[in-house]
Amino acid sequence: MEIDAEYRSRYFDNAATTPVDPRVLEEMLPYFSEGFGNANSIHEPGRRARAGVDLARERVAQLVGANYPELVVFTSGATETNNWFLQSFSSVACSPFEHSSVLETVIASGGEVLENDHYRLFPPLRAKDLTAVMLVNNETGAIFPAYPLGNALFRDLTQAVGKIPLDEHAFDAGSFSAHKFYGPKGVGACFP
């Protein structure tokens, strides 16, 4: 589908989704025709596909400042990642400002939604395995700094990746969706 210049010049919702950058599309196209093998197969098309997956992991790790590219897990997007990752902890707390995919998962699992006391964003934490605090709010654009919370910190980085610098020391794990910064829809990642 060709998007004409007039339509593109009137699109004001890049925080919700972006078109795929032509450079991204160019990088992806060979994997639809030449590098289509199963990345876990030992034959040549499989090895070619594995090399592509490994390269993608390296690039994601570099983009987000992750130290271990081999631990990057690809998903269908941040919503899937948030659900999957948060459900793997027995005790989770989150800010009241999170994306619905985080809030609903925390509430459904019996976790705690921390209240804003107008003086501090977070009250002293009770023993929790994980706290989820987005880096950039998807509705307001507010940036939430990382405070030392004394437990693992998970960040939904969907609105931050590709837009602001990420500090690898500001979180222990994170998620994002590629379509928010000129990547394809249906692609996300989780990483430590």
Image (cartoon, grey):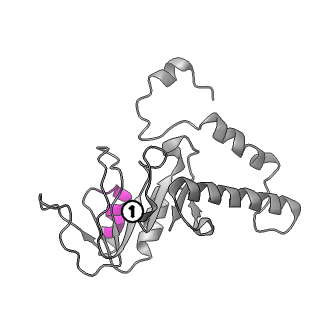
- Which residue, as the protein is rendered here, is positioned at the far right? 44
Of residues 164 and 189, the one nearer the viewer is 164
154 to 35, vertically: above or below: below
Tell whether position 102 is magenta: yes
Q: Quadrant of residue 57?
A: bottom right
Tell whether position 153 is magenta: no
Question: Magenta residues: mostly which secondary structure?
Answer: helix
Q: Quadrant of the N terminus?
A: top right
> Residue 23 location in percent, x, y?
66, 37
> Residue 81 location in percent, x, y?
48, 63
The region drawn magenta spans 98-106
> Residue 186 location in percent, x, y?
56, 51
Label 1 Cα neighbours within 10 Å, binned few <14 / some 14-19 / many ≥20? some
Q: Residue at x 77, y 62 (%)?
A: 38
Mark 1 secondary-structure assignment: helix
145 to 87, vertically: above or below: above
Task: Using residue 147 as the reference point, say whether residue 51 is left or right of it.
Answer: right
Q: Residue at x 12, y 59 (%)?
A: 119
Task: Using residue 39 as the reference point, say whether residue 170 is left or right of it.
Answer: left
**Location of mark 1 (residue):** 170
165 to 20, vertically: above or below: below
Callout count: 1
Q: Residue at x 29, y 47 (%)?
A: 142
> Residue 66 location in percent, x, y?
53, 63
Q: Quadrant of residue 86?
A: bottom left
Of residues 115 and 7, the one nearer the viewer is 115
Task: Using residue 47 as the reference point, say whether residue 160 is left or right of it.
Answer: left
- Which residue, as the protein is rendered here, is positioned at the far top? 6
The amino acid on which the numbered mark 1 sits, given as a three-letter code, is Ala
